[in-house]
Amino acid sequence: MCRRRSAIDTEALGIEFPVAGTSRRSGCVALSNARVPPRRVLASPLESVAVTSRDPEIRTRWGRIVLCTSAGACAIWATLRYAGPTEARNVVVSLFVEGSAALFLLALLFLLERGFTARVTSVVSRQVHDDVVAPLESRVDELAISIADLQTAVDQRRTEQASRHQDLVSRITYPTFSSVTSALAEAARLNAIGSGGVTVQANANPSGIWLEFSWGAYFQDGARIGPDELRIRAEMPKGGPHSDETIDVSWHESDTAPDVARRLEDRLYQAGIRDPRYRPDWSLMMANFQRSVAVALLASDEGWQLQGALYELVGRDWAVTTAGIERRDHGVILPAKEFPRASFPPAPGTQLGDPPAWSPPPPAGADPDEWKLVVSRGQLRLTLKGYGMEIAYGFNTSSLQTWYPVGRQPDTEKTS
C-alpha cells in the first residue's frame, strides 16, 4: 500500500481512493502537493470502487466447488442406477433440458449483470466523489501553501496581530471595562505582563500611590472559586504611614471610569488615607496604563524592545520586568538574578514584606535619585514576590487562594 500523503491523512478516515496515474493494486490516493495538481479527477468510475483480487474476503472457494460438484454427480449416478431403462432415458432427457435452460439463463443474467453493475458503480463513484473526494481536494487546495509563499503568509499574520494590538491600545483612550479587560487579556495571553497585571504611577509624585490593574479570578487547588473580575489595587510606598494598608476595588462591567474613581477615593478616605500624595490623578494614571500596555505588546513608537514580561514602567526610560531592570535602548541593566532574596523569618527590626537594604551603583548617565526609585520599585517585584501567582517565602501554597489572570488560567475541566 502506498504511503504518500498530504497533511490530510485519508487512511485515518478509513478511505482509500485510486486516482489517475496510480496502480490499481495500491488502491490508494497520493495526495502530494509536489506531484499531484490542485484539481484531480478520478480516472474512471470503476477505479473508485476497485477491489484487489488479494482481498481475503473475495477469493475462489475451490473446496466448496468440488464438494457441490461431487454431490451433484453422485445424485445423478444414484438416480440412473436405481431407475429402470424407461425412467433412466427420461432422466437423461430432463437433465439435458434443464442444463440447456440453465446455460441460457446464465447468459441472460451475465448480460443484465454487466449493465446493473456499471450503473451501480457509476452512482457509487459519483456519490463518493461528491461526498468525500471533492471536499478533501478542496481542503487540500485551501491548505496548500508553497514554500515561496510561506514567509509572506507568516508576515501577513504578524501584520494582522500588530494591527489588532494597535487597536487595543487605541481603545484605551476612552477607558471602559471592555477596553481595559481586552488589553489585559491579550497581554496576559502572550505573557507580556508579569503576574498578569500592570502597575502604573497614579499621580505626579513617583513616591506616592501606584495602582495595579489585573483581570482574572481566584483559584484554589486548581479549581475556580470566584468569577473573573477587573481589580484595581492601591499600593502605598514601603516604610510610609500607610504601607500596610490594602485597598482594592472591582471595576464592574456596568461601571464607568468615574464610578470606579469615586469608589476608590471613598475607600482611601475611609482608611484614613487623605494625603494628596495618595490621591490618584485618573487622567495621568490611565495614560500611564495605556503606555504600559503599548510597550508590553510592542505596539509603542518609543523604541522599546523589552527582554522580559513587564511589571511596570518607571519614568520615561526605565522598566521593571521579569528579566530585571531594563532601560530604553539599552536592554537589561540590572538582571533579576542579582536582586537579593528576601529572608524568612524577617531579620531583626524588619517586618515580613520589607525589602532588604541594597544599593547597587547607578549606571553611567543615570540620575542617582531616579535610579534609587527604580531599584526600590524593582525590589517590590523581584525580591518580594508575594503577590498574585508568585509567593516568595517557601510556604506550602497548595491550599492557598491564588490569583490567575484571564489568558493564563488553569484548565478547570482537566483539573476537576
Image: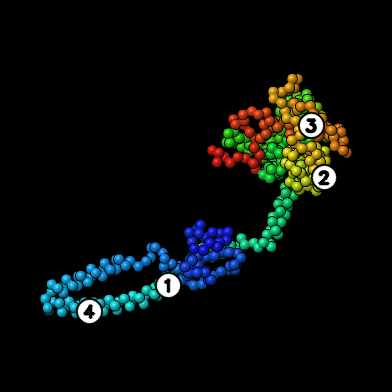
Instruction: Please give the residue where the numbered disc 3 appears in the rendered image.
Output: 376
Query: What kind of residue is marked 4?
Result: Phe
Q: Secondary structure at mark 1?
A: helix
Label 1, residues with CA under 10 Å away: few <14, some 14-19, many ≥20: few
Instruction: Please give the residue where the numbered disc 2 appears in the rendered image.
Output: 329
Query: What kind of residue is marked 2?
Result: Asp
Q: Secondary structure at mark 4?
A: helix
Image coords of residue 363 (percent x, y): 85, 37
Q: Can you tell which quarter of the image residue 120 is in?
A: bottom left
Q: First in sequence: mark 2 or mark 4?
A: 4
- Marks 2 and 4 sit apart, C-alpha to C-alpha, by 106 Å
For image coordinates 55% across by 41% down, the residue present is 414
- Marks 1 and 2 sit apart, C-alpha to C-alpha, by 75 Å
Instruction: Please give the residue where the numbered disc 1 appears in the rendered image.
Output: 119
Q: First in sequence: mark 3 or mark 1?
A: 1
Indicate left or right for 265 with 29 as reference.
Answer: right
- Marks 3 and 4 sit apart, C-alpha to C-alpha, by 114 Å
The image's colouring method is rainbow
Residue 333 to residue 246: above or below: below
- Marks 3 and 1 sit apart, C-alpha to C-alpha, by 85 Å
Q: First in sequence: mark 3 or mark 2?
A: 2
For image coordinates 66% across by 35% down, the residue present is 389
Q: Secondary structure at mark 2?
A: loop
Instruction: Please give the residue where the numbered disc 4 appears in the rendered image.
Output: 96
Q: Nearer the viewer, residue 238 or 321?
A: 321
Image coords of residue 63 (percent x, y): 30, 66
Q: Nearer the viewer, mark 4 or mark 1?
A: 4
